[in-house]
Amino acid sequence: MLIINSPVVELSEIQKGIFLQKIKSPEIANGILPGQFLNIKVSEGFTPLLRRPFSICDVEDDNIFLMFNIYGEGTRILACKHIGDMINILGPLGKGYNFEDEFDIAVIIAGGLGAAPFPYLARKLKDRKEIISFIGGRSKSEVIRYNIPNSLVATEDGSDGFKGNVVQLFENEIRNYFNKSIKVFGCGPNGMLKALSDSVKKLSSEDYNIKCEISTESAMACGFGICQGCPIQDANNPEHYHLICKDGPVFNINDVVL
Amino acid sequence: MKTVDLSVNIGKLKLNNPILLASGTVGYGNEISDFIDLNILGGIITKSISLKPRKGNKPQRIVETSSGMLNAIGLANVGLEEFINEKVPFLAKYNVPIICNIAASSIEEYVECVKVLNDEETIKAFEINVSCPNVKDGGLQFGNNLSMVGKITEQVRSATNKTIIMKLSPNVSYIAEFAKVCKENGADAVSAINTLVGTAFNINTRKPKLSNIFGGLSGPAIKPIALAKVLEIHRNVDIPIIGVGGIMNWQDVIEFMIAGASAIQIGTLNFIDPTASLSILKGLNDYCIERNIESISQLTGSYILE
């Protein structure tokens, strides 16, 4: 874990309302894994007060990438940064995706801005595994395909791709891979993750060889375990919460109650 | 180069400098030790410990507000046994005073915790968190009830010779009264202030943002209140005060000391900059050198009101 000031080298709007910020930070770039996150101080003073957590979106040489929309005060400030402005970064934080275990097919399932961690994961996976991706949103404008390979799209209103939710689409398509060992990497709104949890349970009961890790999110203050502000129920122990910042944000989907 | 004596005394407890890390913002020390050498600190106040482990509140536990944050963690902690077996040995490696914050739901539980921990060499003092619901009194907080605060102080005093610091709630009309009752019952010091009760609503769902409805407000938003409470206690009661509430830099520390604090606690700032103590220490040292202040303790209560 480091606290470091790093300069913005590029800011682009990859599609309407979705920003990609490139920051030169060799120290972070060399140490971070897909699914981990950074807690960013968006201004020099203490307005806003707290840092903002962002998934690592991608890493390329000495540069890291953050993906965000303008959601509140913090992201508004971040979107107004100029090239050369310094960003104060605390990280890398949390536990990322385990992509080095045994499986044949990597399945990426992203809902809305849940696409953020996958360009980096896909970069790490692309030379070793077959990747199939499912990208969802309520409508076309929410679908973020940026650097996610081999993707199928689902929108709830049918404005792009399959009409319905992304987990339904995944379930339809995965039928073609019954004899393969599948690892699902999910990130998206809680409703999507719940549906994914049900789907994985169902497929497991039908003897699919499937495992699944998901990235979760929560309001948090510190990002490294001291504030205890980001609990998620432990599925194996009703008396215990995991902390999303430290024990996650990536969990085996069977280990948490969504 | 001149040296400044940054040491301060809280009753019989001597600290190398006035910077303590506040309970609940430093865990049990291990996470923050990745960022700073704990030995540079005046002391560490551990996360509230209760007799048995507490799971804490459901999410959502944190809400950011203007210049502050609300938290409703619900005193989540590992319990006394794991604290002693797993957390104290880590803290024992450091040469920094460890102050153990204690939370309880009955007077007996406060006393039991103090008795058990009294034998732990590493723990130099107790900070008693009275902002906890009293189960026997329908969940009303001990800290709002003058006679209850007096009783807790008296009972924990009889259980230990170590330094006792009572952490006072600001959610009372006259905090100096509480400080007075702490002194009369044998407390060595008071911490002022704990968080202020607050809440926040989601205007779309009309539901409170915190699962617990109410939370504790901390951060720079509460600093003027904390300063006023410190001053109120200092002007009315002769007891060492540990100032806490919204300290974000060394200037804030000086301000608290002028208002009457003998030492201070850094709280919410630890979440944003866990290394802040380093720059604060330097700032305190430079301030004293520039003004020919030989000992920082001279600042305590040095306000000029006329």
Image: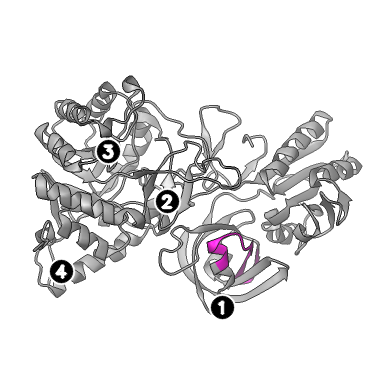
Is there CB contact under 8 Å for labels 2 and 3? no
Reading the chain from its start, which is encountered first: label 3 or label 4? 3
Mark 3 lies on a secondary structure that is strand
The residue nearer to you, when weighing B184 against B23, is: B184
Residue A137 horizontal side relative to residue B233, left or right: right
Which one is closest to the eye, mark 4 or mark 2? 2
Reading the chain from its start, which is encountered first: label 2 or label 3? 2
- In space, the residues marked 2 and 3 are separated at their CA atoms by 24 Å
Q: Where is B114 relative to A212, above or below?
A: above
- In space, the residues marked 4 and 1 are separated at their CA atoms by 39 Å
Going by the numbered disc 2, the residue's amino acid type is Met
Q: Which residue is mark 4?
A: B288
- Tell me where the magenta segment starts and ends, as one range: A58-76
Q: Quadrant of the N terminus of chain B?
A: bottom left
Which one is closest to the eye, mark 3 or mark 4? 4
Res. A119 visible in picture: yes
Q: Quadrant of the C terminus of chain B?
A: bottom left
Q: Where is B290 relative to B4, above or below?
A: below
- In space, the residues marked 3 and 4 are separated at their CA atoms by 30 Å
